[in-house]
Amino acid sequence: MIYQLSVPGPIEDVEELRVLEWHGEAGRQFAKGEMIVELETHKAVVEVRAAQPGVLRRILCPPGEWQTLGRPLAIFSDSADESLPAPDESGAALAVDFEVT
Amino acid sequence: MRKVFFREAIARALREEMECDASVIVLGQDIGRYGGAYKEFAGLFDRFGPARVRDTPVAESSMVGLGVGAAAAGLRPLVAITYMDFLMLGLDALVNYAAKARYKTGGQLRVPMVVKTTAGARGQGVAHSQCIEAWAMSVPGLAVVAPSTPADAYGLLKTSLRHDGPVLFVDHKRLFPVPGNVPLEETSVPFGKANVLRSGNDATVVTHGYMCRVALEAAELLAASGASCEVVDLRSLAPLDVATVAASAARTGVLVTVEEGQSVCGVGTEVAFRVRDEVPALRVARVAAAPAPVSSNPVLEKACLPDALRVAETVRRLLS
């Protein structure tokens, strides 16, 4: 199954944030609880962790790019060999936990 | 253009000016290693060291006084006052010394200093929320600027740091979360030049700082009901660009001023009077904070401050 990782929220005052660092490249398998990506707000870092296992397939926003809350950051799938959807076709939401530090 | 956080636009202007002018220094609370309350000074301490990026005690009166003396002696200090409410402690040095020195000494002493401070309400209560920029507008010899975007924060701070007299640079707590595009090339924004943020034909809304966002929201609401609003961002309160506002108001015939401070002797009162001198047949209204302290209770805070609905209702009232 295909999943979409979106910018989690709500985060107080924040509408748009910047990708700081991906913890892995396309092809990496994430276990539940592992950090996927760090996002930067005007004053804090948002740590986004997998709340379900999944394979990172395609990064849509590389470090330095901006994205608004609820909009997609990356495509995931259950297994590494599933075919990916067309770019504008979104999958189910990937379950994540996030913490503003 | 490159999209940056508001704080990064401020840090960039300071970094560029400190690189090219060794007399530019920064004084403030927690602006050194900590990088400032909003991280708007991040990186400066590491780049320029403790002699030029100086942490001060919590003593605003002394901080501004130190800045005035340093400027009179040949430096170009930026003094950071975390909340605008605390600027009151530094007004003696700013108003009686910085703004008067050139006149009093027949031009022998100049005080090229910037007092940067953060205005506005965001849940912090009666003495951490005020917008008192209108007080400063009436001081001869003092320039007052208030950016509404990262690009204007960058450009106005560049001009402020090169200005030959004291400048009050007013940003706003609610501007910091919002990123915006800033030119890649080095540039500046002149004082006394307002900016038309949105064109329209039925009414002119004039404002500054964070209230520009509220005015633009109101213009969207009004557009949905068929009224077209021009939104003018003053950017610079002293000197004031009356000509740009008057040209717009002469076309629309309706002027609504919006500010987060008080309307009594407020920015809008001054703007409206001066524009009416130029455009006699003008329908005018002011939108400002309620005549009450700003509570830390979010319901009362919201009730006190102008919002898009109040602005839109006021415009509609003048149009009907």
Image (spheres, coloured by chain):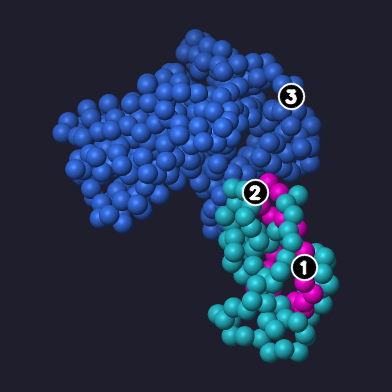
Chain colours: A cyan, B blue
Q: CA distance from mark 2 to mark 1?
A: 24 Å
Image mark for residue A50: 1
CB atoms of marks 1 and 3 within 8 Å: no
Let me know if marks 2 and 1 both belong to one chain.
yes
Secondary structure type for disc 2: loop
Residue B116 is inside the magenta segment:
no
The residue mark sitting in front, 2 or 3, is 2
Q: Tag 2, which chain?
A: A
* Residue extent of the magenta highlight: A40-63
Let me know if marks 2 and 3 both belong to one chain.
no
Residue hosting label 3:
B56
Q: Residues within 10 Å of mark 2 (few under 14, many from 20)?
A: many
Q: Seen in the image, is B311 located left or right of residue B295?
A: left
Amino acid type of disc 3?
Thr
Image mark for residue B169: none
Residue hosting label 2:
A42
Q: Earlier in the sequence, mark 2 or mark 1?
A: 2
